[in-house]
Amino acid sequence: MTFLNCISQACSCVAVARRYGTLCLSALQQGKMFSRRSRFLGVACVLSDSIPTGLAFLLAYWVRVWIGHTGSLSPIYPLRVYLPLLLASLFVFPILGYLLGAYQGVEMRRPRDIANDVVKMTSLGFLILLTGLFLFKGDYVSRSLLLVFAVFHFLLLGVGRAIFIYGISPRNRQERYRHFVIVGTGVAAAELASLLEEGERFGLRLLGFVSTATGESSPPAGLRGSYPVVPLEKLSELLHNHIVDEVVLTAAKMEELSKLEPLMQQCEREGVRMRMHLNFLSTVFSHVYVEHFAHVPLLTFTSTAPDEGGMLLKRIMDFSLAAVALVVLSPVFIFLAALVGLTSPGPIFYRQTRCGLGGRKFSLLKFRSMVDNAEDSLPHLEDLNEADGPAFKMRDDPRCTNVGRWMRAFSLDELPQLWNVLRGDMSLVGPRPPLPSEVEQYESWQRRRLRMRPGLTCLWALEGRSQLRFDRWVKLDLLYIDRWSIWLDCKILLKTIPAVLSGKGAH
């Protein structure tokens, strides 16, 4: 069977699965409960979170009014003046929670997950609100009100989320449990069974396994419970004699896809929901999901997470912070521009063609740190290159001016790239943009670093900057791409400040 035929057959199976039930491609493996129920609970959780947010704001306003009456602080404006801030809060926090994944798999959240969600939503939410107040000149908003609001929001959101999760848990009500049968006894079946055991307190219960191999009667090893294993031909009998809500089929090889459609038809006849876990797909690409192009179902393979909402939030954060930084740092820009212009002949800014998202070329902007026309002398210095791979690094590059060496030590020459961030060529955090000549020398696996918009700072800039080997750069970039989140961007930005101020590792 050719690969294209396998994909065609897989898409056919997907189409059938959508007719007969809800298709779930490794949803349990990703730590999320089944998407339809999760979407419902996610919407309910958004509405539930709005109550603590509104209550926290009103309590904070009442406390601030009381403090004003005591004479400790000046009185504040009437409540109606702050209604736009309240409405913005009711909009910002749910959207932020959605983009941070706080509403995915709500019923599976543990206490530490809830704490992480609350910390992230509160800290980033108030950062966004403060940025908005700065941009729109909200000077009338009391800083003490915001501080009290943040404290109440943190406490009430955590309590409200805990109450919500306790309310949706099945506890001892048997009718809330969903009973599962897993077809297969391999590695994928064992992983799913383990997750179902973990999810029993959330209303999931594993009944047993159906073996697809002749003579196989033992369940997967390592499970807490003891489960029966029945042969494939007795699936119908199992569905007749037991309460089975869902059947999960596992396929470890592409060749096994041909067996799935008859099993789907059997589940349809019995009125039982069926799900598929195509285990072999996870060894091909990092992410697999179903997408429709018009009415045609497409099984989509990608090495980066399909998180359009998160990317939108990343772009909003990039634009907002870059705009603020350009305004706040304008005196620094003027000082550095004068320093470059007065100490060496040539232009103040240096433009260089770099490769951005997907290899798209753009013009990168920097303060000039070398003599004019420095690139003309590069061929004469290549033998002195201290970096491995296609990149060129030299500790005491003779082309650098005295001011340029100082700027490079603290990455001040990179500040004009905030304009590239504002334009959308770059992001605040991401793999550093390579030269086209470097990309031409990339090995196949190294090209994946082009799948994320390049950034001003990155993981390897924190670890060793120019002192790292090229392969280590790329591996850290790929690690960033695979584990990307808004929270990771925030942590990298915060850690970049001391790394840059120390001046260590810069050439």
Image (spheres, grey):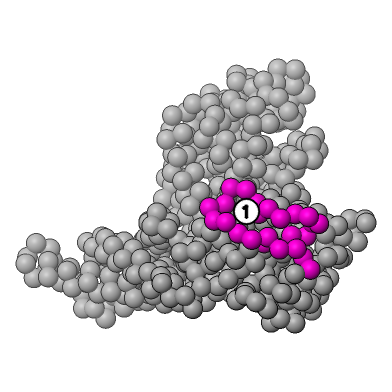
Q: Secondary structure at mark 1?
A: helix
Tell me the kind of residue under disc 1: Glu
Question: Residue 446 in the image: x percent, y percent?
Answer: 73, 39
Q: In terms of secondary structure, what is the magenta stretch mainly?
A: loop
Q: Is residue 15 left or right of residue 504?
A: right
In the displayed orientation, state which residue is furthest to the left: 70
Residues packed near mark 1 inside 10 Å, few (<14), some (14 to 19) or many (20 plus): some
Q: Is residue 75 left or right of residue 157?
A: left
Q: In the rendered image, which quarter contains the N terminus?
A: bottom right
| Residue at image mark 1 | 191
Q: Is residue 435 magenta?
A: no
Instruction: Identify the magenta region.
Output: 209-233
Say whether residue 468 is visible. yes
- Of 297 and 201, nearer the camera is 201
Question: Residue 138 in the image: x percent, y percent?
Answer: 33, 67
As drawn, 74 above or below 378 = below
As drawn, 434 above or below 156 = above
Q: Is residue 452 left or right of residue 128?
A: right
Q: Is residue 211 magenta?
A: yes
- Of 317 and 196, nearer the camera is 196
Q: In the rendered image, which quarter contains the C terminus?
A: top right
Q: Is residue 491 left or right of residue 289?
A: left
Question: Residue 354 in the image: x percent, y percent?
Answer: 70, 43
Say whether residue 300 is visible. no
Q: Which image quarter: residue 170?
A: bottom left
